[in-house]
Amino acid sequence: MFDYLPRSVEAIAVMSPWLAAGRIKNPVDIAEGFDAAPDALRRLFTGQNRGKQLVRLD
């Protein structure tokens, strides 16, 4: 990423309309409950999660 930092303004100009139009999706992998936290952590290190790994606690 840092190799292209000088072009970040260009990237933002191109990608901002895509984000506003919903063409860019941010995948989230949500595990439910405190008991699921250890498995969620393991998923991070094995590559089994998709996008951000979150644990929802109620």
Image: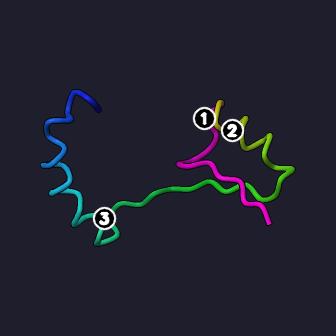
Judging from the image, what secondary structure is the residue with disc 2 in? Answer: helix
Tell me the CA gap for discs 3 and 2. 27 Å
Q: Dot 2 corresponds to which residue?
A: 43
Q: Along the polypeptide, which appears first: circle 3 or circle 2?
A: 3
Q: Dot 1 corresponds to which residue?
A: 47
Residue 21 sits in which quadrant? Answer: bottom left
Q: Residue at x 78, y 41 (%)?
A: 39
Q: Residue at x 80, y 66 (%)?
A: 58
User: Label 1: few (<14), some or many (≥20) within 10 Å?
Assistant: few
Tell me if label 1 and label 3 are in contact, CB under 8 Å.
no
In the rendered image, the vertical position of residue 58 relative to residue 4, given as above or below: below
Specify how the rendered protein is coloured. Answer: rainbow
Judging from the image, what secondary structure is the residue with disc 1 in? Answer: loop
Left or right: residue 13 compared with residue 32: left
User: Label 3: few (<14), some or many (≥20) within 10 Å?
Assistant: few
Tell me the CA gap for discs 1 and 2. 6 Å
The magenta segment? 46-58
Type of amino acid at the residue the image marks with label 3: Leu
Tell me if label 3 and label 2 are in contact, CB under 8 Å.
no
Left or right: residue 55 compared with residue 7: right
Q: Position of residue 54 (x, y in %)?
A: 65, 52
Tell me the CA gap for discs 1 and 3. 25 Å
In the rendered image, the vertical position of residue 39 relative to residue 28, given as above or below: above
Left or right: residue 55 compared with residue 21: right
Tell me if label 1 and label 2 are in contact, CB under 8 Å.
yes
Q: Dot 3 corresponds to which residue?
A: 19
Q: Position of residue 32 (x, y in %)?
A: 77, 59
Q: Along the polypeptide, which appears first: circle 1 or circle 3?
A: 3
Type of amino acid at the residue the image marks with label 1: Gly
Query: Of the residues tagged 1 and 3, which is closer to the observer?
Result: 3
Type of amino acid at the residue the image marks with label 2: Arg
